[in-house]
Image (spheres, rainbow, N blue to C red):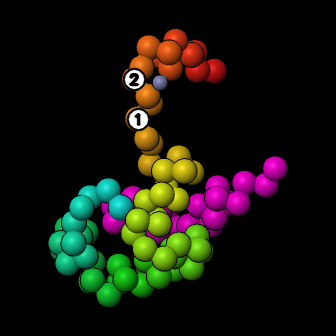
Amino acid sequence: MIDVGNRAIASLTPREKFLMVETTTSGDSLRNLAKRLHLAPQTIKNHLKRIHDKLGTESRLDLLKFAVRNNVIESPRCPCKRCRAIKLG
Ligand SMILES: [Zn+2]
Protein backbone atom coordinates (compact mmCIF):
# COMPACT_ATOMS: atom_id res chain seq x y z
CA MET A 1 0.00 0.00 0.00
CA ILE A 2 1.31 3.42 -0.94
CA ASP A 3 1.20 5.78 2.00
CA VAL A 4 0.21 9.03 0.32
CA GLY A 5 0.15 10.97 3.59
CA ASN A 6 3.64 10.04 4.67
CA ARG A 7 5.01 10.68 1.22
CA ALA A 8 3.50 14.18 1.26
CA ILE A 9 4.95 14.78 4.72
CA ALA A 10 8.35 13.65 3.48
CA SER A 11 8.16 16.28 0.74
CA LEU A 12 8.06 19.06 3.33
CA THR A 13 11.28 20.90 4.10
CA PRO A 14 12.38 20.88 7.77
CA ARG A 15 11.14 24.47 8.12
CA GLU A 16 7.77 23.63 6.56
CA LYS A 17 7.38 20.66 8.88
CA PHE A 18 8.31 22.84 11.86
CA LEU A 19 5.78 25.49 10.84
CA MET A 20 3.14 22.84 10.29
CA VAL A 21 3.45 21.83 13.92
CA GLU A 22 3.82 25.39 15.25
CA THR A 23 0.77 26.75 13.44
CA THR A 24 -1.43 23.86 14.51
CA THR A 25 -0.34 23.38 18.12
CA SER A 26 0.82 26.72 19.51
CA GLY A 27 -2.49 28.56 19.41
CA ASP A 28 -0.54 31.69 18.45
CA SER A 29 -1.97 34.16 15.98
CA LEU A 30 0.00 34.58 12.79
CA ARG A 31 1.31 37.86 14.15
CA ASN A 32 2.54 36.36 17.44
CA LEU A 33 3.95 33.34 15.68
CA ALA A 34 5.93 35.59 13.36
CA LYS A 35 7.25 37.60 16.29
CA ARG A 36 8.22 34.50 18.25
CA LEU A 37 9.93 32.81 15.29
CA HIS A 38 11.63 35.99 14.06
CA LEU A 39 9.92 35.79 10.69
CA ALA A 40 7.74 38.20 8.74
CA PRO A 41 4.03 37.28 8.78
CA GLN A 42 4.13 37.16 4.99
CA THR A 43 6.99 34.66 5.11
CA ILE A 44 4.90 32.36 7.28
CA LYS A 45 1.94 32.82 4.93
CA ASN A 46 4.16 31.85 1.99
CA HIS A 47 5.36 28.75 3.81
CA LEU A 48 1.80 27.81 4.75
CA LYS A 49 0.68 28.18 1.14
CA ARG A 50 3.43 25.80 0.02
CA ILE A 51 2.56 23.37 2.81
CA HIS A 52 -1.12 23.41 1.80
CA ASP A 53 -0.15 22.90 -1.85
CA LYS A 54 2.00 19.89 -0.99
CA LEU A 55 -0.49 18.26 1.37
CA GLY A 56 -3.76 19.19 -0.33
CA THR A 57 -5.00 20.88 2.85
CA GLU A 58 -6.92 24.14 3.02
CA SER A 59 -7.01 25.30 6.63
CA ARG A 60 -5.16 25.05 9.91
CA LEU A 61 -7.70 22.49 11.05
CA ASP A 62 -7.08 20.41 7.91
CA LEU A 63 -3.39 20.66 8.62
CA LEU A 64 -3.85 19.58 12.23
CA LYS A 65 -5.90 16.54 11.19
CA PHE A 66 -3.30 15.64 8.58
CA ALA A 67 -0.50 15.96 11.12
CA VAL A 68 -2.22 13.74 13.68
CA ARG A 69 -3.26 11.11 11.12
CA ASN A 70 0.30 10.86 9.88
CA ASN A 71 1.92 10.83 13.31
CA VAL A 72 3.64 14.18 12.94
CA ILE A 73 1.78 15.20 16.07
CA GLU A 74 1.22 12.40 18.51
CA SER A 75 -2.24 11.81 19.85
CA PRO A 76 -2.24 10.43 23.42
CA ARG A 77 -3.04 6.76 23.72
CA CYS A 78 -6.38 5.71 25.13
CA PRO A 79 -5.77 5.33 28.88
CA CYS A 80 -8.38 2.62 29.48
CA LYS A 81 -7.42 -0.70 31.04
CA ARG A 82 -8.09 -2.70 27.89
CA CYS A 83 -5.83 -0.53 25.71
CA ARG A 84 -3.08 -0.43 28.32
CA ALA A 85 -3.04 -4.22 28.29
CA ILE A 86 -2.19 -4.28 24.59
CA LYS A 87 1.54 -4.58 24.29
CA LEU A 88 3.19 -2.36 21.73
CA GLY A 89 5.66 -4.00 19.42
ZN1 LIG B 1 -9.11 2.13 25.36
Q: Which of 10 and 61 is in front in this view?
A: 61
Q: Main secondary structure of the magenta part?
A: helix
Q: From this viewpoint, is residue 58 visible?
A: yes
Disc 1 element: loop
The amino acid on which the numbered mark 1 sits, given as a three-letter code, is Pro
Question: Disc 1 or disc 2, which is closer to the eye?
Answer: 2
Q: From this viewpoint, is residue 34 visible?
A: no
Compute the Cα span from label 1 to label 2: 8 Å
Residue 14: horizontal and vertical position, in percent?
49, 63
Where 84 falls versus 38 (above or below)? above
In the image, the residue with mark 2 has its CB under 8 Å from the nearest atom of ligand 1: yes
Tally of numbered discs = 2
Numbered range of the magenta stretch: 1-23
- Give the residue number, with chain letter if any, for mark 2: 79
Is 70 on the left or on the right of 26, as rendered? Answer: right
Q: Residue at x 70, y 60 (%)?
A: 4
